[in-house]
Image (cartoon, rainbow, N blue to C red):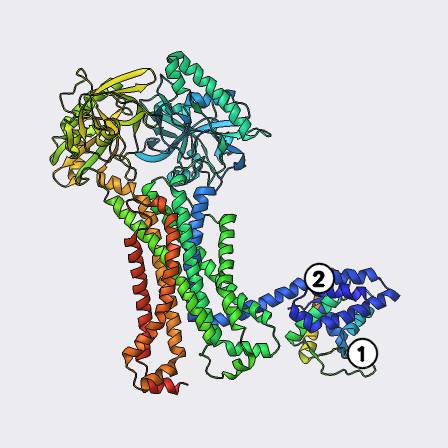
């Protein structure tokens, strides 16, 4: 008895159909075998055989059933190619963007650096910081100086290795051997760089602390520039003033410590004076430190992050105390010693786009998720309609003894096969879309690079989305299709196109849900479109039309600080003579250049209330700066030619500055004292300019004061010339570049462009996100329209005879149209009401991305509702018109 | 295409008379001196596939009134089954001839 019970349990491992067919026979045979074995032979062998079957024969039988289902599914799909094509296309439209955005999201936010044991890496600097910061910082330090890195590397416990890298990826002028100068992406890194990252060159070797004039090149650069030639080692690459010997080639796919960037070559940090001439960024001098490095380390085994941070901070602080103690008064020291390091896990490395892209990518991911849901709705509707057509087949199989569960399994297998093909098509689409998005992003962040990689996480996401989609769109139709009454199903003879009203009801519910889901996407893209429009038309305080900015870098060309002002004077004198130039001036930081200055200040007659108003941003400007821009002076005068190094130091403040520090007082003639460390510099206010934008488009205009560049707060290393033209900008720009080259051909021109182009670049990312969101909104709208059209058209076909009779009885075509449209309204209204609620929630999600409008923007909501209603009307009108033109004789004959 | 060992054993067992499942198992075991013991799972999985391929067929009623249990299902070799067996024998024969000719195993002379 017991033996039989156990064997019955074994049988449960086989597919139900097989068990039904052979279970009893197998039990009998097993019992006989066991009986015989008790007399002669081995009982154990019989049991082992039965147990082995569970692991070998049973899975094989399951596989057989699955294969049968798949074959059947493929046959069914092949028999209705139009349906199959539409279904696969809709799925690919849903799964493709999902996979592409997920892959980008994963790559930007979560992907580990392609180095061994990335999880051991920590950063002592802020992964999102990039660039060069001069002066000092309060609180958490974002970047470090070279001297600080050396101290930490040599004295901090808890790390098994530490390296530093230039936080920004530079475009360098390089020359290979004696060929032409060309541009390459390069990064200065410490001698410990490759060793700490755990990467060995595939050819040659990496440089170490003692190697100086050497470079390691990337695999891509080796392939691109040297055709993968093995004799690349030993060749000379000149980067500006540094002649370097190629020492090694990094492995393929090695990008370094910053995600999304691919340097062409890595050069030892100590080559900085040659690579970035005119600066000394290797030594701290005075209170103005140059912070420009990221510092990475690997923790020693057994050391926690907290321990490492404590030890790093001890070294950092004693370093700061020793350094500032020697050069500053105790009061100034107190101010500058409030700095600390934060040690954080850094398996994903640094990134200059992670912070900006995190929210937009999350929003896009949500949007494409909704698109997939809408696509699933369409498929469910298609399957419902087809299920009705297959009712006879289902009824037949049920009457022949197939169980409902078996049929549902069969139908779900069909859904899964459909979804899988759609998923593969989607994956191909994702590959293309990913490349497209990376290219779009790189328009704004010119160094952004990220290949589509089928990482386990991306693959799992794609498989998961496919599987989930197949359940989402397959379950309801499978359930409803197999719910038929056998006798009714068989009786419905030739009228295979008629469906139950229940299925039509479900179809309408699905369409209402699709419409509801589309609305938040439409509202969201509407809000983003309006935001982009607002940003593009943001009031700068001056006209960007025919305005040029040209940055020259005198420092790199070898000009010492005292030779820079005369050079700028000379350049300006020549620039105003270029034909087409109406006015010209210059400033230190320029317009929308990403460079800014701020310091602690004391304002005459103003009493500080806290830490928030202790500082202000500032810039250094040439004569006629505001006049050139066309920014009106509200009081006093612009900086002019009379403001010379020897005269009284003067500045102009903006409205925001006047509001904040001179509420109700007359600022003209008042003093602003710039306080930095032990330095105090006094400027007298000679004018108040209307607020204008030179840095951020989104933020409120910050209080700012503009000192005369001839009386600088910090020495100029070059200038940004600001030029207003009276004619076309193109030829003027060329003329200006010629003038600069004629004065000194070695001066690098870092950028020469119109302000309009700069703003376009600045808005590139907003534009990409908006365009993608709008595209997905459009796809959602189209899918919903197709869904609505399908359900109505199907309804018309189903009721052909009824409509035919109505027409035969004399109903006007208009009445028929009205009848069909009337049925639509309930769906549309229900969809809009639920969609409105969803849109309300969704607009909160994107509030942080908006500019110049509230998340609950009535105009956008109204427009979105109107668009959706209009498209719904159009989708409904086509089947309604077809119904009204039915020939009653034909319609009735088809019965 | 060679057919599986289990298939071949079942074909041999059914060559002389129609049998039910356990009878096939017994026949295989006795012919091979107990070396080959078909398990119930292997047997019926093979039977399912052989039925699908038309190598055997199931009898509508028990041909053996002397059998103690009439509920058992009996199977019979089809013409296709016989042909498949013949082909398999031919294949094995040719293989054996080749092995002997090459000197891999001693031949009959």
Residue A836 place in picture, x, y as percent: 36, 57
Q: Position of residue B25 (x, y in %)?
A: 78, 70
Task: Report the disc number at residue B69.
Answer: 1
Give the chain of mark 2. A
The residue wearing badge 2 is A54
State left or right for residue A325 relative to residue B38: left
Residue at (43%, 65%) from the top-left corner?
A510
How many circles with numbers are drawn on the protein? 2
For the residues labelled 1 and 2, the Cα–Cα distance comes to: 27 Å
Q: What's the residue at 45%, 36% (across, down)?
A: A230
Q: Is residue A158 something one can see in this rendering?
A: yes
- Answer yes or no: is residue B7 visible: no
Residue located at (50% from left, 21% from top): A314
Please provide percent x and percent y for residue A407: 57, 71
Name the subunit of mark 1. Answer: B
Q: Residues within 10 Å of mark 1 (few under 14, many from 20)?
A: few
Quadrant occupied by the C terminus of chain B: bottom right
Discs 1, 2 touching: Cβ within 8 Å:
no
In this rendered view, identify the residue nearer to me: B109 or A777.
Answer: A777
Q: Is residue A357 above or below residue A808?
A: above
Q: Residue furthest front?
A: A664
Q: Is residue A657 left or right of residue A105?
A: left
* Quarter residue A635 falls in: top left
Q: Quadrant of the N terminus of chain B?
A: bottom right
Q: Nearer the viewer, residue A594 or A185?
A: A594
At mark 1, the secondary structure is: loop
A226 with respect to A70 (left or right): left
Quadrant housing residue A777: bottom left
The secondary structure type at the circle numbered 2 is helix
Please state the horizontal and vertical placement of residue A384, each as a whole percent of the image. Answer: 47, 71
Q: Residues within 10 Å of mark 2 (few under 14, many from 20)?
A: some
Name the outermost residue toward the right. A39
């Amino acid at each position: 008895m017991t033996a039989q019970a156990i064997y019955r349990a074994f049988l449960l491992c086989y597919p139900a159909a097989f068990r039904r067919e052979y279970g009893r026979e197998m039990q009998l045979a097993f019992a006989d075998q066991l009986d015989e074995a008790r007399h002669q032979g081995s009982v154990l062998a019989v049991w082992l055989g039965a147990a082995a079957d569970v692991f070998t024969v049973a899975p094989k039988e399951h596989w057989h059933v699955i294969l049968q289902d798949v074959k059947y599914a493929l046959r069914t799909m092949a028999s209705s190619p139009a349906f199959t094509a539409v279904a696969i296309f809709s799925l690919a439209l849903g799964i493709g963007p999902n996979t592409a955005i997920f892959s980008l999201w994963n790559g930007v936010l979560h992907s580990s650096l392609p180095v061994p044991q990335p999880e051991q890496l920590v950063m002592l600097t802020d992964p999102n910081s990039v660039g060069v910061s001069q002066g000092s910082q309060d609180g958490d330090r974002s970047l470090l100086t070279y001297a600080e890195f050396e101290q930490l590397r040599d004295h901090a416990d808890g790390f098994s290795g530490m390296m530093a890298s230039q936080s920004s990826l530079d475009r360098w002028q390089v020359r290979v051997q004696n060929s032409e100068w060309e541009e390459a992406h390069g990064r200065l890194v410490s001698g410990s760089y490759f060793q700490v990252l755990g990467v060995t060159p595939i050819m040659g070797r990496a440089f170490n602390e003692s190697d100086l004039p050497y470079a390691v090149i990337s695999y891509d650069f080796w392939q691109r520039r040297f055709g993968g030639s093995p004799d690349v080692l030993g060749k000379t690459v000149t980067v500006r003033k540094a002649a370097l010997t190629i020492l090694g080639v990094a492995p393929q796919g090695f990008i370094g410590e910053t995600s999304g960037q691919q340097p062409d070559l890595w050069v030892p940090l100590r080559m900085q004076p040659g690579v970035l001439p005119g600066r000394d960024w290797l030594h701290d001098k005075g209170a103005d430190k140059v912070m420009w490095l990221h510092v990475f380390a690997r923790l020693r085994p057994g050391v926690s992050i907290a321990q490492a941070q404590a030890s790093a901070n001890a070294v950092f602080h004693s370093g700061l105390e020793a350094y500032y103690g020697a050069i500053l008064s105790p009061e100034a020291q107190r101010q500058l010693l409030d700095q600390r390091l934060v040690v954080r896990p850094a398996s994903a490395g640094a990134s200059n786009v992670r912070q900006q892209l995190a929210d937009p990518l999350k929003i896009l991911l949500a949007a494409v998720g909704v698109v997939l849901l809408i696509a699933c709705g369409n498929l469910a509707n298609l399957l419902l309609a087809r299920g009705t057509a297959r009712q006879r087949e289902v009824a037949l199989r049920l009457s022949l003894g197939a169980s409902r569960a078996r049929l549902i399994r069969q139908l779900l297998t069909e859904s899964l096969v459909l979804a899988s093909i759609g998923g593969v098509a989607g994956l191909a689409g994702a590959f293309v879309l990913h490349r497209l998005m990376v290219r779009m992003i790189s328009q704004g962040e010119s160094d952004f690079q990220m290949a589509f990689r089928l990482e386990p996480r991306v693959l799992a996401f794609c498989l998961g989305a496919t599987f989930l989609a197949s359940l989402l769109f397959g379950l309801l139709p499978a359930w409803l299709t197999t719910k038929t009454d056998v006798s009714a199903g068989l009786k419905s003879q030739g009228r295979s196109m008629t469906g139950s009203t229940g299925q039509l009801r479900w179809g309408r519910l699905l369409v209402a849900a699709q419409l509801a889901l589309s609305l938040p996407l439409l509202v969201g893209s509407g809000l983003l479109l309006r935001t982009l429009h607002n940003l593009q038309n943001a009031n700068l305080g001056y006209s960007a039309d025919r305005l040029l900015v040209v940055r020259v870098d005198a420092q790199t060309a070898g000009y010492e600080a005292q030779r820079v002002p005369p050079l700028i004077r000379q350049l300006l004198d020549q620039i105003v003579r270029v034909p087409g130039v109406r006015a010209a001036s210059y400033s230190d930081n320029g317009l929308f250049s990403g460079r800014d200055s701020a310091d602690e200040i004391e304002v005459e007659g103003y009493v500080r209330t806290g830490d928030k108003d202790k500082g202000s941003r500032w810039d250094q400007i040439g004569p006629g700066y505001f006049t050139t821009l066309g920014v009106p002076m509200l009081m006093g005068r612009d900086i002019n030619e009379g403001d010379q190094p020897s005269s009284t130091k003067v500045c102009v403040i903006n409205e925001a500055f006047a509001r904040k520090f001179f509420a109700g007082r007359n600022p003209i003639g008042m003093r602003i004292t710039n306080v930095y460390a032990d330095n105090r510099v006094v400027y007298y206010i000679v004018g108040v300019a209307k607020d204008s934008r030179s840095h951020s488009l989104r933020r409120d205009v910050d209080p700012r004061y503009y000192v005369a560049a001839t009386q600088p707060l910090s020495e100029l290393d070059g200038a940004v010339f600001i030029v207003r033209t009276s004619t076309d900008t193109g030829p003027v720009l060329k003329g200006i570049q010629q003038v600069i080259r004629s004065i000194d051909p070695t001066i690098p021109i870092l950028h020469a462009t119109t302000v309009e182009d700069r703003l376009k670049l600045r808005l590139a990312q907003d534009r990409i996100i908006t365009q993608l969101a709008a595209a997905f909104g459009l796809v959602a709208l189209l899918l919903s329209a197709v869904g609505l059209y399908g359900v109505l058209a199907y309804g018309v076909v189903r009721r052909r005879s009824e409509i035919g009779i109505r027409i035969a009885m004399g109903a006007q075509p208009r009445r028929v149209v009205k009848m069909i449209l009337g049925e639509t309204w309930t769906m549309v209204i229900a969809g809009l009401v639920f969609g409105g609620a969803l849109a309300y929630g969704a607009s909160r999600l994107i509030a942080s991305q908006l500019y110049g409008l509230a998340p609950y923007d009535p105009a956008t909501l109204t427009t979105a509702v109107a668009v959706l209603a209009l498209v719904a009307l159009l989708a409904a009108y086509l089947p309604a018109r077809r119904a009204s033109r039915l020939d009653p004789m034909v319609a009735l004959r088809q019965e | 295409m060679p057919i599986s060992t289990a298939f071949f054993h079942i074909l041999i067992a059914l060559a002389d008379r129609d049998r039910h499942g356990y009878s096939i198992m017994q026949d295989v075991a006795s012919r091979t001196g107990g070396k080959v013991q078909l398990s119930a799972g292997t047997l019926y999985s093979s039977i399912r596939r052989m039925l699908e391929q038309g190598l055997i067929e199931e009898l509508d009623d028990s041909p053996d009134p002397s059998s103690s249990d009439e509920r058992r299902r009996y199977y019979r070799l089809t013409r296709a089954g016989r042909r498949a067996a013949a082909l398999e024998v031919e294949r094995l024969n040719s293989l054996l001839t080749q092995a002997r000719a090459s000197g891999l195993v001693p031949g009959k002379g």
